[in-house]
Image (tube, rainbow, N blue to C red):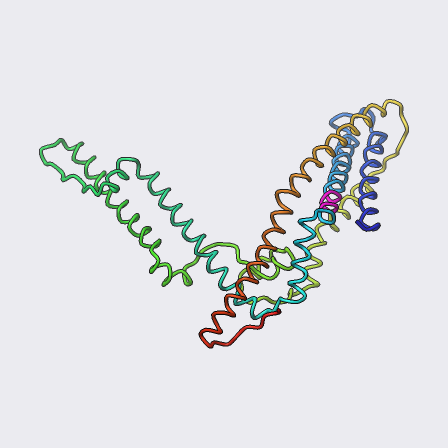
Amino acid sequence: MGVFKKFQYIILYFIGFALIGGTSLLQSGLGWKGLLDLSFYIDILLTNLAIIFCVLATLFKIIGEFKSKNKEYVSSLDNISVFARNKYKPTIFARYTKYINLQRKKIQFEYNVNRKIYELEKKAGEEIVFMWINNEKPKEINKKNSIINRINQKIKNKKFENFKKKREFLEKQLKKDWVDKNLEKTYVKYDKVTADIVIGGYYNKKNNQFENDFIVKNKGWKIAKDRLPMMLFGTGVVCFISSIAFTIVFDWDAIMPILSKLLILIWQAILTIKYADDFCNSIILKDIRFRNGIVNEYDSWVLQELKRTQKTGDLQIEVDK
């Protein structure tokens, strides 16, 4: 980890501990410190800010060290870097993403249809589902039965017919010929594979709507949009604190509040360390494995396409040997 990054974490820790100590020595001059005392709320605000600073410093530090030291992460990232430098060609990669995204769309579509079937059966009930499975026909209404029985039978028959109609339509959507004919023009909400995700590990909602990869548009606006919330937050805190006239006065009675807050801070740091370890293993590794898997799958797809084009005489794609 670079010296500059380590310095950032030290600064965050320093601010956190300074706020913890400073708020306990805070006096607003309004008399008894209670619910009507402004210093009470300033104390809570700054104490929570201190906890946030230290938690973020701990979290970022552990994630940063994990990314720089974990062998699997480093190896996968190196493989992705080699792909980005030597193998990535936008037009060919676009052909690959079109192929792979269609497969992902198909899987998501089939899952959605099966989920609808499950919800349909759950709503219809066991009796209706049993009739469907055993290919039973609705009972004819016997006019000799009471009016209530006839009404109930009519309702049950209508329920069965509605279930049958919906179920047959859903079953039809799962058939291969229907999927091959209609899937591409059917709306399915799913996450597309893009160059942003593979090369940069960044999900771009706008780029996820297009087939062709492209450069990041409106870079200046993106920087402003990403940094503006934190800048406004920092400015707001400074203005809030600066607008209040307070004094820091040392008081032995403040020792216990300081110690209790430090204990809370340490406890939060311990919890954050545990969370950061779980986050690295369940999220960071998962993401890099997915990205690396796409790169490896792309290599296999390129070789398959090369063999196919050699047999059919189509335009061959370039492959780095």
Q: Quadrant of the C terminus?
A: bottom right
Residue at 71% across / 59% down in the picture? 223
Image coordinates for residue 184, horizontal then vertical, percent: 42, 62
Task: From the viewer's perspective, tell me whether residue 276 is left or right of residue 21.
Answer: left
For the record, the magenta segment spans: 60-66
Magenta: predominant secondary structure element? helix
Of residue 11 and residue 178, the one placed in the foreground of this image is 178
Q: Is residue 33 visible to us here?
A: yes
Taking 239 as reference, is 246 above or below it? above
Looking at the image, can residue 159 be seen?
A: no
Q: Residue furthest right?
A: 250
Q: Position of residue 123 (x, y in %)?
A: 34, 39
Name the image quarter holding residue 18: top right
The question of residue 247 being in magenta is answered with: no
The residue located at (40%, 52%) in the rendering is: 110
Q: Residue at x 18, y 42 (%)?
A: 137
Front one among 281 and 145: 281
Point out the residue furthest to the left here: 144
Q: In the visual, does 90 lie left or right of 48?
A: left
Q: Is residue 283 above or below residue 92?
A: above
Residue 147, x across and y down, in percent: 15, 33
Image quadrant where residue 38 sits: top right
- Residue 35, how many percent across, how many down? 73, 27
How many discs mark residues in the rendered view?
0
Does 97 appear above or below 14?
A: below
| Residue 64 included in the magenta stretch of the image | yes
Residue found at x 41% / y 63%: 185
